[in-house]
């Protein structure tokens, strides 16, 4: 039986103790646990309060009777939990099982017609067959499409590849440049049209152009021109003959998309637009012995400047 802490336990007397015995126990315990006799003990005051409450309840007959009834009630509540010696406590009652929300009641197929059952079985069989055999069929199809995975033909069978019929307009042939005349040589300035954006012209009195062939369809142009009251200057550029650049059977040389030259009869027409000017010059080929002092000096300066740019890796080659 569980033990209850009562006022009798506080005064350390039995439940049948007389009033005099209770009074004597209170005096003895109060003298022992009084705070004045236990300085520095924080539990002395708490014990003294419990002793006073217990003595007031047990010294009064009505309060003692009420306390005894409370003790009897507590013992009566604990009485059903007692089991006889040698016996085991009865097992607890089973807890009621809660129906699962996720589970659905089984389908009652008793009322389903036989035709519908057969249709359901056929649908299930078809779905299972597709799930099993579809990956296998796809694997076989992929394997058969690969040329390396096909079985080798028999030795006595000879497969002769047949040429595919092609239209003459579709047959692709390597593009080749037509044979063009060699432009290497010395040219003399015939005419010059040099104008700024504001329309002011610049007159070139003399000019010399040497064209040297570097490789197939690539030329180095060394140009020297004399401007009146200014002097002679030389420049060097690389021009190329490119496929598809032939218009009206005229040979065209291109430095870039803006600078180009075209051979018209016995004259080479050179176009060179700048940032704030445009220039068109006409050149005619002359014998190798054509020489002018200042123009020859400009040609040498242009050649030397081109070599320096090549060494520095900033010139076209």
Image (cartoon, helix red, strand yellow):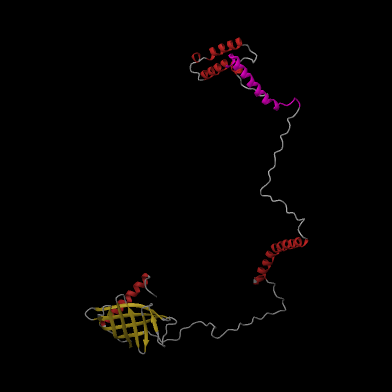
Magenta stretch prevailing secondary structure: helix
Q: Quadrant of residue 231?
A: bottom left
How far across and how far down the image is residue 80, in percent? 70, 27
Q: Is residue 294 above or below residue 20?
A: below
Furthest residue toward bottom:
265
61 drawn magenta = yes
| Residue 290 on image: x %, y % | 30, 86
Could you tell me residue 86's position as x and y percent?
76, 26
For the residue pair 270 and 167, the one nearer the viewer reads as 167
Assess whether residue 151 is covered by the magenta stretch.
Answer: no
Magenta stretch: give its range: 57-86
Labels in figure, total: 0
Q: Is residue 59 above or below residue 193?
A: above
309 up-or-down from 83: above or below: below
Out of 5 and 302, give the one closest to the viewer. 5
* Residue in the picture at 65% in, 71% down: 145
Between 208 and 241, the one nearer to me in the picture:
241
Classify the position of the C terminus by image quarter.
bottom left
Task: Tell me the quarter of the picture where residue 211 sits.
Answer: bottom left
Q: Quadrant of the N terminus?
A: top right
The x and y percentages for residue 122 are 74, 63
């Amino acid at each position: 039986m569980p033990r209850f802490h009562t006022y009798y336990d506080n005064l350390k007397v039995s439940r049948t103790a007389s009033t005099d015995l209770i009074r004597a126990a209170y005096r003895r315990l109060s003298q022992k646990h009084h705070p004045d006799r236990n300085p520095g003990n924080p539990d002395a005051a708490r014990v003294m309060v419990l002793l006073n409450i217990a003595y007031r309840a047990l010294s009064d007959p009505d309060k003692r009777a009420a306390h005894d009834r409370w003790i009897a009630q507590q013992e009566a509540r604990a009485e059903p939990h007692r089991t006889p010696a040698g016996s085991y406590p009865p097992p607890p009652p089973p807890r009621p099982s809660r129906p699962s929300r996720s589970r659905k009641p089984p389908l009652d197929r008793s009322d389903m017609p036989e035709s519908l059952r057969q249709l359901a079985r056929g649908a299930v069989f078809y779905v299972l067959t597709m799930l099993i055999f579809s990956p296998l069929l796809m694997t076989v199809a992929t394997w058969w499409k690969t040329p390396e995975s096909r079985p080798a033909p028999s030795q006595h069978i000879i497969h002769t590849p047949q040429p595919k019929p092609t239209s003459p307009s579709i047959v692709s042939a390597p593009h080749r440049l037509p044979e063009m005349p060699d432009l290497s040589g010395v040219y003399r300035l015939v005419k010059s049209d040099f104008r700024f954006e504001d329309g002011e012209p610049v007159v070139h009195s003399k000019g010399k152009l040497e064209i040297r062939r570097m490789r197939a369809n690539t030329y180095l142009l060394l140009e020297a021109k004399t401007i009146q009251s200014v002097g002679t200057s030389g420049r060097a550029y690389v021009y190329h003959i490119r496929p598809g650049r032939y218009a009206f059977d005229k040979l065209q040389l291109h430095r870039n998309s803006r600078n180009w030259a075209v051979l018209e009869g016995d004259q080479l027409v050179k176009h060179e637009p700048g940032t704030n000017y445009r220039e068109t010059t006409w050149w005619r080929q002359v014998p190798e012995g054509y020489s002018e002092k200042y123009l020859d000096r400009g040609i040498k300066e242009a050649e030397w400047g081109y070599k320096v740019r090549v060494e520095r890796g900033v010139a076209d080659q």
